Structures are given as structure tokens and as C-alpha cells.
Image (cartoon, rainbow, N blue to C red):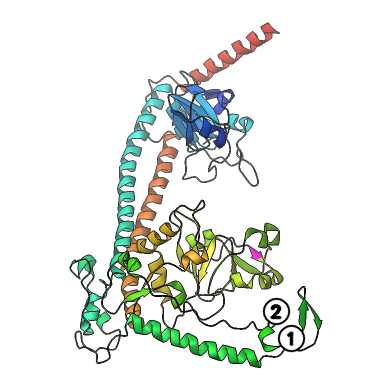
Amino acid sequence: MGKDIELPIGWIFLTLEDVADIHDNLREPVNSVERAKRHGPYPYYGATGQVGWIDDYRQNGEYVLLGEDGAPFFDWLKDKAYLVSGKCWVNNHAHVLKGKEGVCSNRYLLYALNQTDYRGYANGTTRLKLTQSAMRRIPVNLAPPKEQHRIVAKIEELFSELDKGVENLKTAQSQLKVYRQALLKHAFEGKLTAQWRAERNVTPAKVGGQPLNDMDSRLPPAFARVTGNDEVGGGNDKPLETAEALLKRIQQERAQRFKQQLAEWEKSPSIPLLQRGKPTSTAPIPPLEKGGNGGISKPKPPKSLPPLTAEELAELPELPEGWGWARPEEICIQEPYSIGIGPFGSNLKVSDYRESGIPLIFVKNITRSNFIKDLKYIDEAKYRELLPHSVKALDLLITKMGDPPGDCEIYPEGSPNAVLTADCLKFRLWDEFASRKLYKYCINSNFVKRQLGLITKGVAQKKISVERFKTICLPFFCVEEQNVLVQELESKLSEVDQLDQTITTSLQQAEALRQSILKKAFSGQLVPQDPNDEPASELLARIRTEKAVQQNNKKGRL
């Protein structure tokens, strides 16, 4: 908006201070602690909307609020101004404006400000700010008063239609989330692979008395052949391994690996004696004291976990025949720190960050599934210091915070070794026995989310500790069925993802259309002009006259 376009006859180029009164003197900040003591019925507004309630008001009427700082000035799809009415309180992060009576209506001003290009007006390095002096210079294409009303009416008519479409899209998006969770629920109750098990001559358990083909759970014939059957229903002589048998096999493998690791440790060379972390002698160290500065720590024997109690099992849903429950420690790989969290704050400071080196993983990387852009790094020396918190490609990464916590993503294959930050957790599965993709889906399901919510209930900060995470129960079953279930989930969830992306694109297009409507409105192309309308130039003459009178009055008081 400005003098780079040709306006219709009767329109004029003005600045914001010509068309609006500025009431920034009415605003006053009140911090959150004070507001908590003064909670009341009046809305308390900030840069982009309401941020709380308070027991008093400083404004009473209709105003346009324009962000001073904290507003998305350079995001052309987002609003920078909004309308308020009635009794309220505005803090110092928003400018308080009112269209000059008879010159510019509040709604016309609102829409004009929401299609303004703020480049050259909002400035700042870390946080953009629109100062009052810069705001006064913002250009406004002013239409004749009657045309302003027609423009506002047309904008609101079109926006109303858009809003209905957006509401329908958001409803569909919410329904997709419900469907996704219902699909995961059926998956980990054994319903999605029920037919596959039947075709393998395994009788599926009845789950909640519901039909097995709920949620379109029947597998296509191709899935019956995943394990080598040439024909659907052809059967297989080899029975499926039960979860109980598989867990015993894992325990046996752990014991065997421990023996091998212990033998290797006993054969390992001695290292210098340590005093305060530094070598002081080359005297040999007895086998049981090996370790430390470059040495091999003595391996720990595998831990045998007690079985779930009857009370614990009663809280869990029924599983199909042959399935069972596993805790994270039972299916993690036989390595130190296979389940771990990021370092405490004092062990990793902002001053440790580098422009390149070993990448750090933050919560945002997990929630956005983005491990490439906007990374922070540490150097090799710091990495060696933080090895217990290191991450390898294909580790499961889980957020420790949230309501509930527990968003899960796989650290992509081929990614470099990295280090977790404080609010992240890693889970390194034993991939010979447990599918990473499957347990990513499982941890992201409402069933596991509820468990994570319960174990952090009552905690001041809802954070998952390693010990709490180790208490959750995960459905466990043979690797063959895990692979079949992953294929089925990927097939169905890819359709969900495609629909979700289509909806997201449509929502973005709706916002772009909103801006297109505003652009047409303030270039005079949205409604036809009426030659009988009073030209806006007469408004300009009136404004100049008013200014001259005000200046004369000021001089007379001096």
C-alpha cells in the first residue's frame, strides 16, 4: 500500500497519523505476578491478542490495536492488528489507535493495517519493533467515506465465507488426528494384524468383544505373503514366537554378550593409575580396577526385571494370544547408556555452543522432525565429555516435556553422532528384536502418552526422568508380526499424511486468498466506485484545516 500504485478517482494517499488518533498514553504494562493478584473480569491485551484478565480497565470503547513488538510484521499471512471493544486494559506491546471520526472507520483502518508491508517501518535485530514515530509514517490508501463502508462490508462478506471453509478444514484436520490415534489403538491391540495371525494358524484374541475388521483392519493378500506364504490362508508350519519366548531369548543373548564383554575386559591392557583424573604412574592396575582415562570400564551384568504384578496387569488392556508386555530396559540394546537423557544445564552451557562441530539435539528438532536446519554445535572435546548423552543414527528421540510429554522421532539414518540437550531422552532399541518404526508409532500413541502423563502427574515440571520412562509398558510380539504391522501402519498413515498435507495447503491458500482480497480492497478493485461519493480529497482539506486550527490554538496558549 502506498504511492507505487495508481488509485481510483476520489482516493488519496495519506499516512496513519492523518487518519487515526493515537492513544498510547492509555496503555500500561502489568506483569504476570501482579495480574495474578489482580485477576478480574476485564480482558488484558498484548501485541497480538488477549494475554490475561485484570480487575480494572483503562480503555472503554472500540479501538484498533497494532503490535509494537512481538507481532509477526514480516509474515504476510498473519494479522498484525486486531479490533477490541468495551472495557479493557492494553499493555505497552501494542499501539492503541482509533480512526478519526468522519475520516476513517476503525474497521477500514484495521484491514488497511493488516495488508501493510512493514518493511522499512518495523526494525530490530533480535526482536522487531514498530516505534510510534515509524508507525505514524505508515501509508494508508484512503477511499471516500461511503466507499469505505462498502469495502468493509464486502471484505467481511468474503471473509465470512472463507472462515466457514477454514472451520470445515480445521474440523477435518481434527478428525484426522482422531483417526490416526484410533488406528494406532487398533494396531497395538492386535486388530490390524488379526487376519494375518489367523492365516498363520494362530487364533487371535478377542479384544473388547469388537469385530476384528474394525477400522478397516483386514490386511490385503500381499501382507499374508510377507512371511513367505505363497497363498492366502496357506498356513505356515513354523509357529509364531511368543513374546514370552522372545523375551527369554533376549535375556539369554544378554547373558552371552556379558560373558564375552567380561572376557574382553579381563584381557584388556592396564592403564596408568589415576589421581584427580590425571595419570601419575605406569604401575599395573588389578583387573577389577580397570577403567578411567581411556580404559575399558568393567561391564555390568544384565538386570533381570521382576514380572508385572497382577495389579499392574489389571491396569493394562487385553492383548492377543502370543503377545506380551515389555519395559524399555527389556528391549534396549546391550550397551551403556542405551536409555539416557541430556546433560543438566550446568554441564552444557550456551558458551559451549559453536558454529560447527558435533550437532546438538533440542526438543524443537524432535517435534518438527528436522535435524538439519538451524542447528547448534559443540566441539570434539565437549563431545567426549558428554559421551553418555550422545546419540547415534536410528536412535529413538523423545521429548521429556509437554502435556503429556513423549513426542517421539527417529534420528535419521546417515546422520552424524550428536548430543542431546536437557529436555530430550534417547531410547536405543535392540533392532534384532524390536522395530524402531513400530515403537516410534507406539510411543506416539495415546496409550503410551497416557502412561507418560500419569508418571509425571503431580510433578512440578512435567518431565520424564530416565527412571520413570523405564516403568512404562509396551506391547511386544514376534519380529515377523512387527514387520507386518509396520507395513500396514505405513500404508494407512501415509494416506492420512497426504490428506493432512492437502488440508494444510488449503489452509495456507485460504490465508493467501485473504491477503489477495485485502490487496484488491485497498487498490480500489474490490467494489465499484460511485461518482456521487464525496472525494477523499475533501477529507484531506478538512484534515489540513483542523491541523491549522490546532496549531493556532497551541500558539495562542504560549
Q: Quadrant of the C terminus?
A: top right
List x then y, in percent, for residue 317.
29, 66
- Which kind of residue does numbered mark 1 sit on? Ile
Residue 497 coordinates in the image, percent (x, y): 36, 63
Q: Which residue is mark 2?
A: 292
Q: In this rendering, would 539 be left or right of 203? A: right
**Of 145 and 208, the residue lying toward us:** 208
Q: Is residue 370 above or below residue 171?
A: below
Quadrant location of residue 376? bottom right
Q: Is residue 532 above or below residue 187?
A: above
Residue 66 % position (x, y): 52, 33
Instruction: Return the mark for residue 271.
Output: 1
Q: Which residues are magenta?
A: 371-377
Residue 246 visible in rendering: yes
User: Can residue 10 be spotted in the picture?
Assistant: no
Residue at 56% across, 13% down: 546
Label 2, secondary structure: give it.
Answer: loop
In the rendered structure, does residue 78 fall within the stretch colored magenta?
Answer: no
Q: Nearer the viewer, residue 527 or 492?
A: 492
Secondary structure of residue under mark 1: loop
Is the C-beta separation of discs 1 and 2 under 8 Å? yes
Give the overall secondary structure of the magenta segment.
loop
Q: Quadrant of residue 448?
A: bottom left
Residue in the foreground of this view, choosing between 71 and 88: 88
| Residue 193, quarter of the rendered image | bottom left
**Which amino acid type is marked by label 2?**
Gly
| Residue 222, position as x, y percentages in the image | 26, 81
Name the mark on residue 532: none
Residue 197 is left or right of residue 102, and the answer is: left
The answer to if 373 sits in the magenta stretch is yes
Q: CA distance from mark 1 to mark 2?
A: 8 Å
